[in-house]
Image (cartoon, coloured by chain):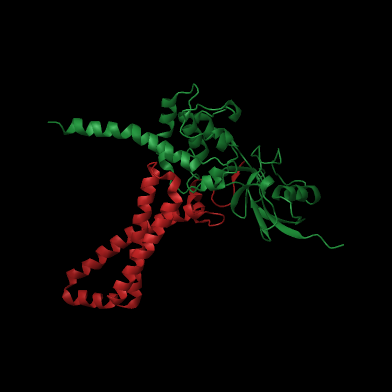
Chain colours: A red, B green
Amino acid sequence: MTRTGPERGTGGRQASRWLDPRGRHLGTWAFLANRLTGLGLVAYLYLHLVILSTLLRGPEAWDGLVRLFRNPVFLAFDVLLVLGLAFHGFNGLRVALVGSGLLVDRHKALLAAAGILVGLVSLVAAVRIFFG
Amino acid sequence: MSTPRTVLLKVFRSTPAGHGPRYDEFRVPVGPRTTVLDALLAARRDQDPSLAVRHSCLHGSCGTCGMRVNGREVLACLTRLDGLGDPVVVEPLAGLSVMGDLVVDMEGVYGRVEPAGRPLVRASEGARPELEELERFEDCLECGLCLSACPVAGDPRFLGPAALAAAERVLEEPRGADPKAVLGLVDDAHGAWRCHAAFECSAVCPAGVDPGGAIMRLRRRLLADRLPRLVGRYHREARP
C-alpha cells in the first residue's frame, strides 16, 4: 500500500496544494491570486445581475438599494472589485505573453509591472469612489 | 565545555504497513555546517533506526534526497540546518506516492520523463554551435523537486515540468530522436498547455535547469507550428 504525502498531494488534494503557502515563491501567489480573482469576478457578475433585478420592483426599491451602496463599507467593496479586476486583467496579460513564449526571461519584471499598474489603478479608483 | 546547540526535527512518518501518517519529533545536535540529511541520519542512527530516508552521493549530484523542509523543496544533502528555525518540519515530496516516511516512489518522475525521450548526452560531448543558447537539460538530476513544487502537478495526468523540459531539450537538439512524436506528446491539454506559468519548478531546481522557461519555449514552438495552419484554414473556409 502506498500513501500520498501531507498536503499538496495528488488528485483531490489539488486545492490544498494551491493553498499551502509554505516555501512558495511569487509566481505561485500570482497564480493563486489570478484564480481567486477570477472566481470572485464570476461571483460578482451573478451578484450584479441579482442586484439589477431589483429594478423590477420599481424605482423606490432601486433608490433604497443605491442609498445602501453609498455606505463606506460597500464603497470599500467597490475598490476591492476594481483591484481584483485590475489584477486579473494585467496579470492575465502577463500570463498570456509569457505563456505564448514571449518575454519569458522577463516574467518577473512583467509581474512587478503588473503589480505597479494594479496599485495605480486601484489608488485612482479609490480616490474617485470615495471623494469623486 | 558548552552544550552543543540542538534543533527539533518534526518528521513526517508513514509506513507501507499503514502506520501513520504522523509527525515524530527528533532533537538533534546542530553545528554550523550540519545539513538536514546529516541530522536525519543522526536521528536514524541514535534515536529511531526505522526512519526511512533515501540518499546516495551526499553532494547534490544524484538527486535522491529530495524532500520538503519547512514546506520548500530541497535536496537535504545541500541544505544547512542552521538558520531554518526551530522546529524544522521535514516531509516527503508532494504529488508522489510515499513508500515510507520520507521516501517517495520516483516512478511518478521517471514514468513521465521517459516518453519525452530523456537526453542522455553528456555536457562534455558539446552541442551544435548554431544553437541559440546552450542550455543542457542533461543537468537535470531527475530529483522530482520541480514536480513537487508545481501547483498543478498534483494531477497525475499532467506531464510535469521535468518531462516537458526534457521534451524541449529533445526538440532543440534531437540527436536521432523523432521531433514529431515528442511534439505530439507535449501538444496536449495535460502537456505543455497545462502549465500555469508559476515558475516554482525553476525556483526550486537544484541543478539550474529552467523547466518553466523550457515549457514556455515549447509553447512558442507549438504556436509557431499551429498558427499558420489555423490562419490557412480560416482563409480556406472564408472563401466563397
Residue at (45%, 45%) from the top-left corner? A105
The reply, left or right, for residue B46 in relation to residue B180 is right
Q: Residue B44: x and y, percent?
A: 76, 48
Quarter of the C terminus of chain A within the rendering:
bottom left
Q: Residue A129: x and y, percent?
A: 30, 72
Residue at (51%, 52%) from the top-left corner? A17
Quarter of the N terminus of chain A within the rendering:
top right
Nearest the eye: A118 or A4: A118
Give the answer, above or below, for where B41 lies relative to B182: below
The reply, left or right, for residue A1 in relation to residue B165 is right
Q: Residue A89: x and y, percent?
A: 34, 55
Nearest the eye: B127 or A33: B127
Give the answer, above or below, for where B174 lies relative to B205: above
Q: Residue furthest right?
A: B1
Q: Residue A26: x and y, percent?
A: 49, 55
Residue B48 can be seen in this image: no
Residue A120 can be seen in this image: yes
